[in-house]
Image (cartoon, coloured by chain):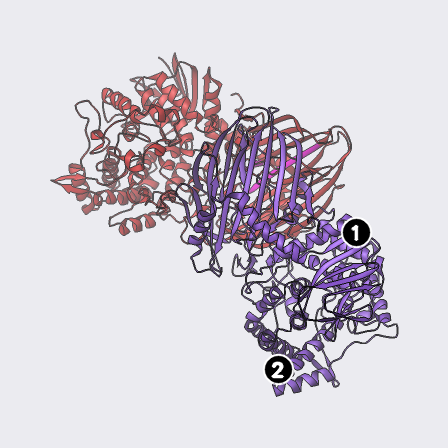
Chain colours: A purple, B red
Amino acid sequence: MNEVNVINENKFDLQSINKYATIMALGNGYLGLRASHEEYYSEQTRGMYVAGVYNKFTSNDVTEIVNLPDLIGMKIEINGEIFSVLTGEILSYERILNMQKGELTREVVWKNKDGNRFCLKFQRFASKDNLHLLASKITVISLDCDASVKITTGIDAQTSNFGKQHLLEENIRVIDKKVMHAVYRTTESNHTIALATSCNVPSTSDVSFVAKNRQLMAIIKQDLTVDQPFELEKISAIYTSIDKVEEEPAQASIQAVQDNKSTGYDRLLESSAIKWNHFWEQKRVCISSKEEIDQIAIDFSLYHIEIMTPSHDDRFSVGAKGLTGEGYKGHVFWDTEIFIAPFHLFTEPEVARKLLTYRYLHIKEAKDKATKNGYAGALFPWESAYSGMEETPEYAAINILTGTRQKVASAIAEHHIVADIAFAVCQYYENTLDDVFMANEGLELLKETARFWISRTTDENEVLSINDVIGPDEYTEHINNNAYTNYMAYYNVQQALCYMEKYNKIEEDLIKSGNDFLNRLYLPQPNEDKIIPQDDTFLLKPEIDLSIYKQTQGSQAILFDYSRQEVNEMQILKQADVVMLLYLFPNLFDEDVVKKNLHYYEEHTIHDSSLSKAIHAIVAARCGEKENAYRLFQEACLIDLGPNPKSSDEGIHAASLGANWLATIFGFANITVDANKLKINPNLPKNWDKLFFPFHWQGTNLKISITHESITVTKQTDAEVAIEINGELFNLTDQIIASL
Amino acid sequence: MNEVNVINENKFDLQSINKYATIMALGNGYLGLRASHEEYYSEQTRGMYVAGVYNKFTSNDVTEIVNLPDLIGMKIEINGEIFSVLTGEILSYERILNMQKGELTREVVWKNKDGNRFCLKFQRFASKDNLHLLASKITVISLDCDASVKITTGIDAQTSNFGKQHLLEENIRVIDKKVMHAVYRTTESNHTIALATSCNVPSTSDVSFVAKNRQLMAIIKQDLTVDQPFELEKISAIYTSIDKVEEEPAQASIQAVQDNKSTGYDRLLESSAIKWNHFWEQKRVCISSKEEIDQIAIDFSLYHIEIMTPSHDDRFSVGAKGLTGEGYKGHVFWDTEIFIAPFHLFTEPEVARKLLTYRYLHIKEAKDKATKNGYAGALFPWESAYSGMEETPEYAAINILTGTRQKVASAIAEHHIVADIAFAVCQYYENTLDDVFMANEGLELLKETARFWISRTTDENEVLSINDVIGPDEYTEHINNNAYTNYMAYYNVQQALCYMEKYNKIEEDLIKSGNDFLNRLYLPQPNEDKIIPQDDTFLLKPEIDLSIYKQTQGSQAILFDYSRQEVNEMQILKQADVVMLLYLFPNLFDEDVVKKNLHYYEEHTIHDSSLSKAIHAIVAARCGEKENAYRLFQEACLIDLGPNPKSSDEGIHAASLGANWLATIFGFANITVDANKLKINPNLPKNWDKLFFPFHWQGTNLKISITHESITVTKQTDAEVAIEINGELFNLTDQIIASL
């Protein structure tokens, strides 16, 4: 296996400083750290987040992931001049996110105003070995003359969420004239956050400490001899009161720094890199493509999925921006179950179980929401955070021109998330056959979600409708019988009944009402043109030419020209619900229907949602439209990695990265599961010579290698596995090599 | 009269960015605006403050002056490149604070990375004509090529007090696609702050608006034709719920912008400049000196005294940093009465009366504080803000090395402020003979403060001591019979009795206890060396050589070498209490005692307090030590204007600026008031050829001109004034010309 790709930045560009701060972020699922520079730029949004640590700025505000005090910032003064890439002259600049070992490095050769050159090397990582550890290192070499350097760094609690301050400073200390230590408390959620950090410097350095205005800083002064490197290592630890550790966070953070500070950066990095190496060995997808970006994009996707997922703790889930920014306030959407969890499920199912457990742990809050809204069962919140309660803002941001605020409809009507969670439960069981989970948490989730759907219907002449919903396509609100929602709800109830029977945990009432629901629920059927109507009225609405909006996909430019209400009354899609449905249920309709719907809805879809393209790619690939699929995939890969300098300012597009993996595995490799059987019908793009990936199936770790000529499947465990490859059934005992 | 001086900055230096943001601040007593640049620098602390608008970040926090949303910041992009003085090449740079008309301007010629030159001119002022108005203007000229400019500016509520956010965003709007409008509320004090701003741009500009993350911004795009200036004017208004206006602040702010936006920058500036011109005509001190800095420093002092003083509203007073920064949290100290009020009293007594009214309005809170501390009468808080309650933090900042916090003793023991206020009351009456004020508010203040002192004594063998106090010298805490405090308390009680009798508002009990106090209070007397002991134990304490600490005056460097406790036990002074006493009561001791004490205490004083030097200068001048006095004065003038790049980061040294005026008038002109008679015994420094200043004395505006040869006094009003010049009594009817 080649080394995992690196993400490069070869020149400094102020305009894209926050894009790179996002895409080059570090993390380990416990914490996420934006790739802000050590030195300060006013355009730069610093950010460090810990999974689960949310707070409300005021009681009227929406809870948001808390931007924690900064441990990275350094004021670097060389011969009295503040180092900045904007000043002096940059003779060379390279920043690298090494995804193979989870390290961010930067090397700059800087000529100061006096014409003297200095080489500055920066390194940092968030440990994958000890999730609470963060380490950084700076090396300064004066290339032309003896010089002096002064570095001010420590713990900076002037950071905030764009001006909203969530943290009270509870205590600051310097322990043994070495370890800086600070404790904060969130103002509303009342979590304690403890940080500790220690600077390792040569004994010749002059070190003093200062605390003021929410900053606790070490000031390190050192004379530089020409060509002699000066190294400063900063070993930091973060603990919070919601960690599953016995010690108090304050003590734990100090102890972690005390225990690790003398180990030093390089050895701590090594321990972390071993874990990263293991991750890549177990889970990397290798694409031999004529286009280098394909492998980079899939490495990038997996790297970010890994750092965004709090696999250490089943009380947390994945935010829509992971832990890389404050977009969507760090909230959890259906993105987790439908776009991100499958990667885990098919590589390390325990992680997928934890993500489902997060939902299970909040079934009470979901039931409360259902009750409050007049429904039975569990209505999971559209946006969720630490409490498990609905966190969607009640009103959208003010329309500054009219002064009005629109109610946000998602929490009230975007109910498909209930069935999405149920779908993920079933998908989890199909792959793991984990009866312990399924007979308990799983079934409970299925039953309560089924109860919700049964109560969600309206009886219209003996036919059950699901009215006034929003499907994944948020450009079409408050419609009846959304195809995606109705089919998903049907599946949800069907599976609930099925598993009740399987485990003989019968609730007669539920069986009865569930069967009635299944018998009478309206399921939109293809019309004479074989088009499945997205909802009761969609196909009746006028169409407009969307080509200009497609050119600026992702920007929601249509909303500059039309009001939301006007968009709602036209056949304009943010993402295509029917295509989504076809992806999740590949065998629901015959190929002709699938193709026709893909084309019809693709034409009407702007892809303003980052969740859209890769799903279209999957369905296109399955239809054998390889190049169309490949184009959609490549475009999807550019959502974060593309040239738009602002696209990722507020964080990574978490779901889209999950979708890139889905497109590769379920689109190009075209794996499907039918009646408990694995099927592979590959559709590799012309540009790809080979696709290799691990796939966990019912307790067995498969390695699947696909070329245009053949498929090779190997496994490490004993159990036999039946796999249907291009329609031919194989029984995998040791290795299958199938010609295509 | 020559034009008032300007303060110049001829080159941009990141290290002193906050010093200049302070010293070049604009304001009008209602609001203060730091001279932060339009473009953003991470080292730069922006700040806008309105007198009286304080808030507590948490209930445990000390109230602090609120840093309001920014109206000045502009992101300027030229041909897609973000303008910053750090990037490209600066071909010329000049920033000028024009104190004559209260305008800050800057002109930069910038060569961008493509080698094209642009001239950017920035202007702004806070209106002295309409205190709620702020206007700014930017002119961009492309010197080499056609180009495009994009400016993003509006109302930015991401500002905070070093990370502490005091404001909730209540409403944001764009009115008539023109006026940006935002309303905030302070979290604890519950004040409403309303801002409105309008950008005037050519009709060819493309303007759009965006609101996000506490920012409401206009985005203005304009194509530039070579050599054709593009002008953007921004007319802004600020109103709060504590303004004395009838309208709601929201509506008032919108209306003010609507009313003034078409008037435009230049005409609004003109109206403001007329008021500034009037100020300088009435109040300027003119020094013909061989050293240009002397005139600059006195202009600078008066400019800042004027912008720091909320003379529009007697419910507010002057913070220790004026409205130029967050040092001392914007709190009001004795600085106002003793250092700042005299300038007003002797130029425009109504302003001095308002400052006293501020104290009078909070007599209840002062009485509550006295009661709470077991005393009678009124114990005014050491630090005061909007509420009039004690705002001194209970504990000092944590000692980060020991983890302990020391109790702040000032609120408990620095009681001389009570007598300082009483002194100012008497000084006010002596100059104004304002019986209406004195018989009511004034007498009430004198009586309640007298009552406090009477209750503050300890009877020690029939002698009354005032124990456990802190004098102005804060390096000596918890001492008994502080000379400054005891003499001031004596004067306080004496004057209370005197005015009670004058207005025949006798309280028998108070007369009796007051006389007993006067009879028995211990008043430290000069010892055999003619030294007045600062307190009971001071002269017994060991001395050390302070010369190294004097070299870094103002930095409190001694506290790096000695603990506060150790400093307390040595003859080390931050500022000299006895010298302060000698300044306030020039006739208390004969000249020999004054000289000996000046020298003794000067030797033991580090001048770590910015209040110190100018007072020493006064006493030295009065002793005829002109050159010593002049040296001290010049050093005092450099407290803000000197080369230290960090000295004024947190705001101007308000009291020291007042003291510069005091030194000029009461030191070098050497005006004293004795038995209701004005005396002038000038001691001009050798460098000064002439000193000219206005002086308001008992209803008459005098103009006093002093050279080494003669004094000329003129007046505009009819009343006769008796003036003793160098011991000779003159009766001023029209003009006095006295030879020296």
Looking at the image, can residue A43 be seen?
A: no
The CA span between labels 1 and 2 is 47 Å
Chain at numbered mark 1: A
Q: Nearer the viewer, residue B619 or A285?
A: A285
What secondary structure is the magenta-colored segment mainly? Answer: strand
**Which residue is identified by label 2?**
A503
Q: Nearer the viewer, residue A336 or A97?
A: A97
As drawn, B477 above or below B177: above
Q: Does the magenta portion include B289?
A: no
**Percent x, y of residue A658:** 69, 59
**Which residue is identified by label 1?**
A289
Magenta span of residues: B125-140
Query: Is B553 placed left or right of A122 in the picture?
Result: left
As drawn, B550 above or below A132: above
User: Residue, x 24% and y 33% (percent of image)?
Assistant: B483
User: Residue, x 61% and y 56% (percent of image)?
Assistant: A308
Quadrant occupied by the C terminus of chain A: bottom right
Question: Which residue type carries mark 1?
Answer: Ser
First in residue order: circle 1 vs circle 2: 1
Q: Nearer the viewer, residue A485 or B419?
A: A485
Q: Secondary structure at mark 2?
A: loop
- Mark 1: few/some/many CA within 10 Å (<14, 14-19, 20+): some
Question: Which residue type carries mark 2?
Answer: Tyr
Q: Secondary structure at mark 1?
A: strand
Query: Is B25 placed left or right of A603 in the picture?
Result: left
- Mark 2: few/some/many CA within 10 Å (<14, 14-19, 20+): few
Q: Nearer the viewer, residue B257 or B70?
A: B70
Write down the quadrant of residue A523 in the picture. Answer: bottom right
